[in-house]
Structure formats: structure tokens, C-alpha cells
Amino acid sequence: MADTYVLVHGAWHTGELLEPTAKHLRSRGHTVHCPTLAGNRPGDDRATVGLADAATSLLDFLEQQKLENVRLVGHSYGGMVISQVADWAPQRIRRLVYINGFVPFNGQCLNDMVPGPFKELFDNLAAANNGALMLPFPIWREVFINDGDLALAESSYARLNPQPYRTFTDPVALRTELAAMPMGKSFVNFQQDVSMPHSMPWHPRLSERLGLFRLSEAPGSHEALFTHPELTAKKIEEAGRD
């Protein structure tokens, strides 16, 4: 059965970086969109763009494209964005799919879900760059793309862009907690993802906040979108189907 997927990228990314995964989903007969959020577009002011701006840009995309009954997929930080949009426009969404994504309670920001040393590092990096956050390559290489070789780590890092730090510090505003929202929910967990320490895991620590949800797991790092796009597409489809 052909479904409509909207793939929402994580921090430092653009929609273009999701195209290899989207290509495999399209080969399976699905319609797939990969928008780039406000804050990660060329010329965006990283000092002023916040979480609501990013979420509004996604809602605008859904409305402009007249998309309904969609599988809204959020990778990492993208989980914050799809959570906000699900609260604003639940009528457009068939299912939420989080790929090692942040699942907030009302009033939480992304930084509320990361270890204290991560927040301190982010604070210092953003303060030194006028509110724009960029990870040093050694962290990216060891923590985010640990299942890729050096050449892939270097080439993927070169395609990243600075993240507006306000998207990490602004709280989400949910009228209804995610567990009580009416649409289906799924969580894809890549098991070698160490971008969050395994003492504070993505699953089940964050996934269980979805209430009733479908779990799909696979071997891979936080950046399986780069290292294993075909497998990622398969897992998205598994998580997104009815």
C-alpha cells in the first residue's frame, strides 16, 4: 500500500540529506517529502530562530502541499518539531514515527533530555558563535556516526550546517501530551546509537512517553541515514505502516 511520508531532519541537517533514504521509500511506491526546517536553510539567522519557528515552517509545508493522512517522521531533534506540529494539526497526521528522536513532555526543551555535560558543552559552543551550535568533528565521528568509516564521516560532516541553539533551549508547548494524542505512534531505535549515553537511552527512556507505540529496532548508529539508508527506509516503512 502506498503511503505519504514527510521526513523531518535532525539538528545540523537539511532535507536534502534525507534523500538517499527517501529514494528507497519511493522505490517501494510511497510518496516522500523532505523539507528543510527554518533555521537550517541558507541565510537563516541562527541567533534568532527558535523551536516554534522550525515547527511553523513544517506546518506551513504541510498546508502548502495540502498534505493529509501523513506519516510524519522525525529524526533526533526532528522529534521535537514533529511533536509540536502534532499538537497543532493532529488532523493531518496518520502516524508519528521517531527515529532515535526526542519525545518531550509539555514544557520541556531538548536540553532537558540530555546529560548535564552535554548541555554545558552546547552552552559553551553556542556562546562562542553567536547562538549557532556546531559539533567538533571528533565528537561527530565517534558519537554520531560510529558505524561509518572515516571517509564517510568526513564527507557527511562537511555537509552539515550550524544549528540555531534556541531550538535546543525553547520549550515545546503541548495542549495534549503525546501519549494521549489520537494518531498512531512508532519509535525506531538504532541499537549502536551512542549520541545519548546508554545509561540514558533513547529506548525505553524516551520512547515509552508515547504511550501505546510500535517499536522497530535495527543495528546502526545515530546517523544510519548516512551509513545504511536502505535499512533506514525499511525500518521507517515497518514503523509507519498500518
Image (tube, rainbow, N blue to C red):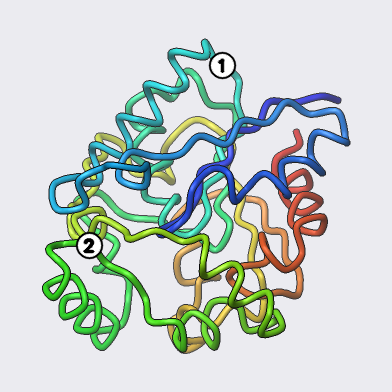
Picture quadrant where residue 175 is located: top left
- At horizontal 25% and vertical 68% (from top left) the residue drawn is 111
Marks 2 and 1, how far apart in space? 33 Å
Name the residue beneath numbered marker 2: 132
Residue 199 vs residue 210, the one in the foreground: 199
- At horizontal 71% and vertical 83% (from top left) the residue drawn is 149
Tag 2's secondary structure?
strand
Q: Which mark is residue 179?
A: none
Picture quadrant where residue 141 is located: bottom right
Question: In the rendered structure, which amino acid carries the disc numbered 1?
Answer: Glu
Task: For the N terminus, give its image quadrant.
Answer: top right
Picture quadrant where residue 70 is located: top right
Name the residue beneath numbered marker 1: 68
* Residue 208, visible in the rendered structure: no
Q: Earlier in the sequence, mark 2 or mark 1?
A: 1
Residue 198 vs residue 62, the one in the foreground: 62
Tag 1's secondary structure?
loop
Residue 72 point in image, percent of width and height? 55, 36
Question: In the rendered structure, which amino acid carries the disc numbered 2?
Answer: Ala
Q: Nearer the viewer, mark 2 or mark 1?
A: 2
Is there CB contact under 8 Å for labels 2 and 1?
no
